[in-house]
Every structure is written in C-alpha cells, then in structure tokens.
Image (spheres, helix red, strand yellow):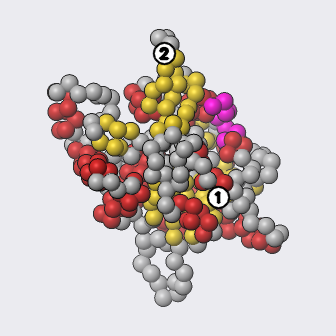
Amino acid sequence: MRIVVPAGGIGGARFLRGLKAALGIGAPATDEQTTVNTITVIGNTGDDITLFGLRICPDLDTVMYTLGGGIDEEQGWGRADETFTVKEELAAYGMKPTWFGLGDRDTATHIVRAQMIAAGYPLSAITEALCDRWRPGVRLIPMTDDQVETHVVVDDGGGRRAIHFQEWWIRHRAALPAEQIISVGADAAEPAPGVLAAVAEADAVIIPPSNPVVSVGSILNVPGIREAMVGKTVVGVSPIIGGAPVRGMADACLTAIGVETGAGAVAEHLGPDLLDGWLVDDADAGTVVEGVEVRSRPLYMSDPAATEAIARAAVDLAVELAGRGAADGGTGG
C-alpha cells in the first residue's frame, strides 16, 4: 500500500512508528513478500519559528528523530541524551527568549538547516538531506516550502495582540484564552514539491491523532492539499478520548475555533467531504458522524504493541472502505 499521513507533533510521530510496524516497513524482507508498502508524511510547518538566527521546525524534527531513533522517549520531543550548555550560555549573555529551550544536539540540526537556507535550498530539499542521516523509513515532506507560521490572538489584560503559537503553547502553556488562531502566510503558500503527487498516487490517507487545529489543520490550510485528499479514501484517528485530548492542550485550540472537545465534533470539523472513516476510543463508542463510518476500539498508544494495533485498525478500515467504494463505483471521500 501507498499511505499518505498528514502529521505533526508527538502523537503523529508515535502513530507513524506504529504504522511502520503494521505495514512491515523496516522489517527484514521475506521470500513471500511481493509488494513494498510506503508511507509519505506531509509534515506540519506551521509551528516553525526563527530564534537566535536559526529556523526551527519542531514537527518535522520530532517525526525525523522519533522514526530515526534519536528522540527523547520520555518527553516525546527533542534529542535523547541532550545537554543544554548553549542554552545556558545564551541566557548568560541575556539573550531572549529564555522560554524556548534549545538543546545542544538539537541545535546542530538547526545550524545545518540555517546554513542550507542561506545557501538557497528550499525546506523540502533540506528536510530530505537531514533525513539522509536519520533514515526514518518514510518519505518526509514539509507541507510547503513557503513560510507559514501559526499565530494566536490573545487578550492578556493589556489589550488584544498576536503572539507566535510557540510562545502561547510553551511560555503560557495555552493558559491565555485564545480569541483566534491564524495561519499567517497559508493563503499564499503552495504545497511543497511531491506533496500533491504523493496524495494522487496514494491508496489511502490516514490522519493520525495529531492536534486537529494546529497540526493537521495547518496542513489542510495550504491551498490544494485538502482538495487533493477529497476523493481519496481518508481514515482518521481521534485525538480526543472521553472529551479530553490524549496529550497536550488540543482542547484550548478547539475552544479557540469554536469546536467542542469531543471525538465526534472533531470529525465533523474535519468534514464528511474529507473523512470516510473515523476511529474513536471505546469510551466514545456510539459516536455518530453523518456520512462517516465510525468504529470504536482502544486508542491509547500505551506501548509499541498497542500503537501498532491502532495503526493496523486504521489501515484495515481504509482497505475495507476503499473496497466498498470500488464496488459502488466511487473513489471515497
């Protein structure tokens, strides 16, 4: 199978690891194996930020490190065995901001990226070069080579102002009520080379349990990407279990755009024009979304085996729905 996954953040990266296992990617080949399964990841770049002269791409790097074996497993982001000498030295010089902690190993990645940007390389080519080291086992493409940044409109008592998503998320822990979330630059952005072709050639699109607003939503905001996915077989995995996000503060993001924090509400927000299937946790069994096939099963990615089982369930549902669409003379979506 050829699978496309629009992904960002810890949940998306860990799901991808389970999906690789479910599809046998990275496992030793057998004599009976006649086809090769592939995964193309469209990575969110809306979280990207420039600090200390370096372009930082948190979601691309989280996917790359997680699948390449370099992630800090406990926190789910950043490098394993990390040190923070550079961060401490920057603070000693009085450099701001101090709320974004760059690790020494991680900084090396950002320096390589900054040098390649200065040399004129697009982000897609830079990401491919970085992946040459990490060998993630998937094709990782940024959603766009153009600069798109997620900003959040807040009112902290001193009036309304827009701050970068990273400041709202990390410095304020999403505690400042968000009045609006804006993808700055998205309207004028174009999909990175290879994105639309990967979707066109895909047997299915699987939406992982990533933040539906600032991860998956940012990707779908790039003109042409959502439109390319409509008509494909699309199965999503709910990031909401029992009315709460599995991890992080996705509820604050959903509240900002006026969407209820619920498994069904997120599916309705993504839309039945896009989704064919939707996996919810057993805690949300009975969820009904008009025009979407909803199935319930345990969705906590508690260990590698559980994560692989969730990914396999998503693939199985996609295969079932694609077969049903073919029998009906349709293509899904």
Where residue 65 appears, as percent x and y from the top left, is: 36, 55
Q: How many marks?
A: 2
**Residue 18 at x, y = what percent?**
50, 60
Q: Is residue 210 visible?
A: no
* Left or right: residue 142 compared with residue 188: left
Amino acid type at image mark 1: Ala
* Image height of 223 relative to 325, above or below: above
- Residue 38: assigned label: none
Q: Which type of secondary structure does the marked residue at label 2 adopt?
A: loop
Quarter of the picture containing the C terminus is bottom right
Query: Considering the image in quadrants, where does the N terminus appear?
Result: bottom right
Of 89 and 194, the residue lying toward us: 194
Magenta stretch holds residue 261 = yes
Residue pointed to by mark 1:
228
Amino acid type, label 2:
Asp
Kindly identify which residue carries mark 2.
Answer: 156
In terms of secondary structure, what is the magenta stretch mainly?
loop
